[in-house]
Amino acid sequence: MITVENLTKSFRGQTGPVVALDDVTLDVRAGTIAGVVGPSGSGKSTLARLIALQERPDSGVIRLDGQNLAGLDPRRLRAARSRIGVLSPGESLLRQRTAAGNIALPLEQAGLDGPERRTKVGRLLDLIGLTELAATYPDELTPGQRRRVAVARALVGEPDVLLADDPTGALDPDGAAGVLTVLDRARAELGATVLVATADPHVVRRIADDVAVLEHGRLLERGGLLELLHDPESRVARTILPAIDESAPRHGHDRVADVVLIGFAAVGALLPEASGRFGVDVAVLGGGLTRLGETPVARFRVGVSGERADTAIGWIGDRGGLVHAVPTGPRGVAA
Ligand code: ADP
């Protein structure tokens, strides 16, 4: 478990101090994947570097399983560092070493030799799905494969925590998907706690359990991804859920509502069942379907017509759909 309390960090900028992190408090539960999201310059990398002990905060506390990482003596600091694996943006592999050789490098540096080293490297090649390409040099790998090797190298010391700063940056969708699968496996199969800094909502959708939103160094929102979807004001919900085209016509229905449905059963059945049960017509006016990890999630704008439209909408809400009424006509026009 990583705990960050009131973390503040500023840098000297050209026209004065730049506050990169401003009183940020959050925690990352052990064995979960937490996404730290926000636009470029919001402080994500700074947060990752502080937790990685690569830089010191101006104030605030970082704890790893309750242990305050500030003020450790050099021996304890080394021990704490070895519990944290880091994937930094732009980090490159050694061109003259094979994929396996790159993964083995930290073990060689630590003086680990022989069968134990081979076993660890072999296990990680399997985890990243590149066993067949163990003897391949970086120049012959795709960018996505190279990034997977870099993840394996960050994991080779069996850290409890993996900090992945912009792990999918500059990769094509296939390459990015491969890297995200590896991060997910690191959590599931190695039990690693993973913190991912990213500006890409797709990364959060695909692998995050929890999410924290930064803007100008401030924490705007944090929580479990599925929980945040229940909050209509949530920025995460607005970014993650399928968009609704507000300009699309919505007149001609008795009621219009935005409905968020979570899970196979809700997404597949709730709307048609409401329609059949209450004899109402349910038309999908906008929105769409996405997936959070393995969970299908939909946000639809629906137009409901029929005598029992209100009852049907109430029933969808009772069955776990998140329903927000929408005016039936455009603003200023009578419905
Ligand atoms: P992000 O990762 O979200 O893009 P960063 O943590 O890299 O954000 O940067 C946050 C702010 O701190 C930005 O304004 C950036 O310019 C500034 N900053 C980050 N690192 C340094 C540094 N080493 N020196 C000066 N300013 C920095």
Image: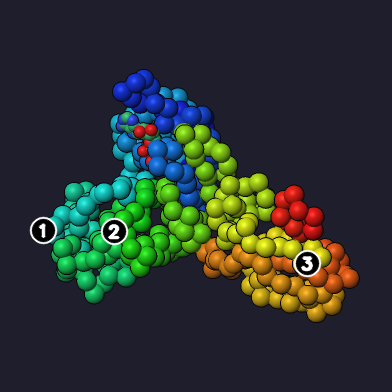
Badge 1 residue CB within 8 Å of ligand 1? no
Amino acid under label 3? His
C-alpha span from label 3 to label 2: 51 Å
Using the image, determine if residue 333 lies above or below residue 184: above
Q: Which residue is mark 2?
A: 147
Amino acid under label 1? Gln
Q: Quadrant of ligand 1?
A: top left
C-alpha span from label 1 to label 2: 16 Å
In this view, which residue lies farthest toward the front? 333
Instruction: Write down the quadrant of residue 148 in the picture.
Output: bottom left
In this view, which residue lies farthest toward the bottom? 276
Taking 257 as reference, is 147 left or right? left
Q: Which residue is mark 3?
A: 253
* Crowding near the residue tagged with mark 2, few <14, some 14–19, many ≥20 C-alpha atoms within 10 Å: many
Amino acid under label 2? Arg
Residue in view at x 13 percent, y 57 percent: 95
* Residue contact at pointers 1 and 2, CB within 8 angstroms: no
**Foreground residue, 166 or 156?**
166
**Foreground residue, 170 or 29?**
170
**Foreground residue, 254 or 318?**
254
Q: Which mark is residue 96?
A: 1
In this view, which residue lies farthest toward the left? 96
Question: Disc 3 vs disc 2: which is toward the camera?
Answer: 3
Residue 275 seen in the figure: yes
* Crowding near the residue tagged with mark 1, few <14, some 14–19, many ≥20 C-alpha atoms within 10 Å: few
Residue in view at x 52 percent, y 43 percent: 213
State which tag comes first along the sequence, 1 or 2. Answer: 1
